[in-house]
Image (spheres, rainbow, N blue to C red):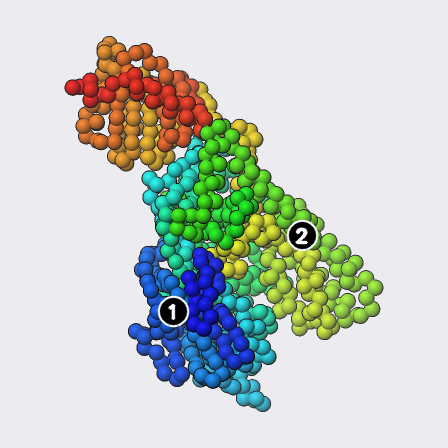
Amino acid sequence: MTLNSRKTYSRSGSIALYSFTPFKILECTKDSYRLLLVPISDFKIIKNGQEIERNQEYSIWRSKALVMSDRIPIRVGQKVIQKDIILPVECYATTLSRESGDQYIYERMGAIPPLHIEFSFKSLTQPRICRLGYVLLSSEDYCPIRRRCKKYRREEISGICRYYRKIDNTYTGLFNVFPEIKSQFSTRDENIDFVIVLPLPGSYEPLLKIGFTTKGNAYVFINAVFLMPKRRWYFYRPYFIVYPKKSLGYRIENVHALILDFEPTSLKKMIEEKMLSDENVRAWLMYKFKLLFEALNGSISEIANPRKDFGFRVFDMMQKFISGIKNKDSSLSLEVNDYGAFIQYCTYILLHTLAHALISFIASYMQCSEDIMHYFIGHPFTGFHNNYRVIIFEDASGGYGFLQELYFRLKTQISSGDEELIRRFIMSVNEAFNAGLRAKRHKQYCVADKSIITRIPQEISSYITSKFAYGLHDDDLMHDLKLIAEFLCQILNYHIDLGVYPHVLAVRNSLVQVLSSSFKSSKTRAWVDDILSCYPSCWDSCPLCVMFERGCMYHSYNQPFTLSSRLLHKFIDQLSSIYNNFNLEYAARRMGVGEIVEKLLRSVRSKIKITSPYLSSTCLQKLVIPLLEKNISVELVTLSPSSVEHLRTHQDALKLLSSLTRRYNNIEVYLVEKPLHDKFIVLDDLVLIEGSFNFTESGLYKNLESIRVKFKLRNVMKALKYFEYLKELAKSIHQLSS
């Protein structure tokens, strides 16, 4: 992508989106500013006093930029909306100079700030703003929306609104402007090459399949633009978000992607039984869920919609709750009313956190930049029914080769019976957590669990006394420090039994709001941040543990509620237990092994191979026909009718198979004349089921039989090789009937 006009800059991939973000200064001199202006949703545009007609709005793009445009369906939570993606080869910036006097004003009616944004040379060099955020940028001496603003408060002396201020700075010193980069990925299941299945720890149930594709399609685009004040005291709000009517982005084809595909039932079972059994993990996730459930009015799936500003609302709720603790009128319970929604929330949090951990690991392991990779989450919250996937893909058509090389290494290792790459990932995440702990100034407060929280109130009092109050001869300051210590201890003591605590930013804001009127010393405000260094800073999503912030589709006030370092750490513990305890094989001797076979067959995606000397029609009808109707390829090796003339049940099963081969084109049956005793089933060339049972009513449901489920690819490959050998010895059922 190229930026043209006077100077030319070329960028590619996601770097282009960060470089050419709308409303970000591209170049500034003493006499001119250059930036990319675009239409914004819900705003009208007024150029030099004349409103631009809707059908002419895109003229400010400078028409040559609109080389190509795609209209694609984007899932936003449970909804699907049509999104226009501008795919420019060249972008043409707008130059605002002292001589031209051009002025672009964005205005909208409503109550959500901002309502007025002016881009002109004067507003960029001598900006005026509303501290409440209703006027984001202006050059006028008096508030331009004073006649319709409900928050307008005129000061008697100056005649200017008390919130409307002139800033002794320029636009470049006023805001950090950065994009919300969103991605959309799609591929067909038949284009995914899965190389390994990991089971639920201690079980035969598949949990996770890892695969790779070279045939993905993706869009990467700017969904929103954030304007973050560089000085917090300029505005009361930390962020302002605007949404371009058409998104600047790019399309990539033949995308290389690593895919982690979870079995829904196993994922939920692992979270409920293996992860939420940890008191600290459960408490934190319930705490976040309760806050979100109220902020989103029960529509918890809206967490997958990055446009929702639930983070701001939750922080406001925390601040009100803290004030209630001070006034002794707050109560908090971690019990959840909608347990199903809570589990779904946990699955989404795990997938999102895991995506960031994977990108961080891949970049480190393959010695490449994290900036060339994006993630995409398939989940019911994002509109994908019964689909739980983490997809990591490279942002170049045909890929850069890093993910493909990673895939080749993984496949080679797994084929030789080695899972070194997966072990390295486990070690990498664990090291990242430990590195985060070491980096903390007060590491005992990082990842603070319930046992640590009980000690913190006393330690805070001691810390303030020893570091700040000792030897201090200022009675007013001593009074304020004691007040702050009591406030912090009261908050933490309230939460000790729950094992959670409010976010440090919410505590800071509440502390200033609640206590500032009681401070006796003017020096106290300057000491607040230093005092709060002894408050637990980890809130179950600390970027020191795993680098969550880079490339995240959520802004930092939403991130704490969409990530969980504790949940990820517990998941890594479960992966570690699979390998440390060699839980890649399940064995049992029991009656009714068919129940296990049935559950495993439900996870089949593309093909199944069955070897069984004897068959029965009831099992074929119950287990095989449903697979055929789902268009799953079935290959079956069994004894020929001449080998078992005395067995009527097997003869009937062969007649049924013969009719099935005529009705369905996705089944092949091979008949062996020689003695056959082996019994095994291979699922998707990834999972091996073997044992003493035949594929009959008695073998699967009545007899006491042995069963072994193996997930090591080396075992699966041996079985596949033997299956091909049996096919060479056999005749097709078509040959026999002819």
Task: Report which residue position mark 2 lands on.
Answer: 440
Label 2 or label 1, whichever comes before in sequence order: 1
Which residue is nearer to you in this view: 1 or 479? 1
The kind of residue on which mark 2 rests is Lys
Q: Which numbered dot is residue 672?
A: none
Q: Secondary structure at mark 1?
A: loop
Relative to residue 101, is residue 578 depicted above or below? above
Residue 347 placed where, x, y %? 46, 46
Q: CA distance from mark 2 to mark 1?
A: 42 Å
Q: Secondary structure at mark 2?
A: loop
Relative to residue 655, is residue 495 depicted above or below? below
Residue 526 placed where, x, y %? 70, 69
**Split into 4 quadrants, where in the image is the N terminus?**
bottom left
Q: Residue at x 41, y 26 (%)?
A: 717
Relative to residue 156, is residue 513 depicted above or below? above
Is 179 on the left or on the right of 483, as rendered? left
**Split into 4 quadrants, where in the image is the C terminus?**
top left
Residue placed farthest to the top in the image? 646
Task: Report which residue position mark 1 lands on.
Answer: 41
Which residue is nearer to you in this view: 675 or 202? 675
Q: Residue at x 40, y 75 (%)?
A: 108
Is 66 on the left or on the right of 514, as rendered? left
Which residue is nearer to you in this view: 197 or 622? 197
The kind of residue on which mark 1 rests is Ser
Q: How many marks on residues? A: 2
Q: Residue at x 34, y 71 (%)?
A: 63
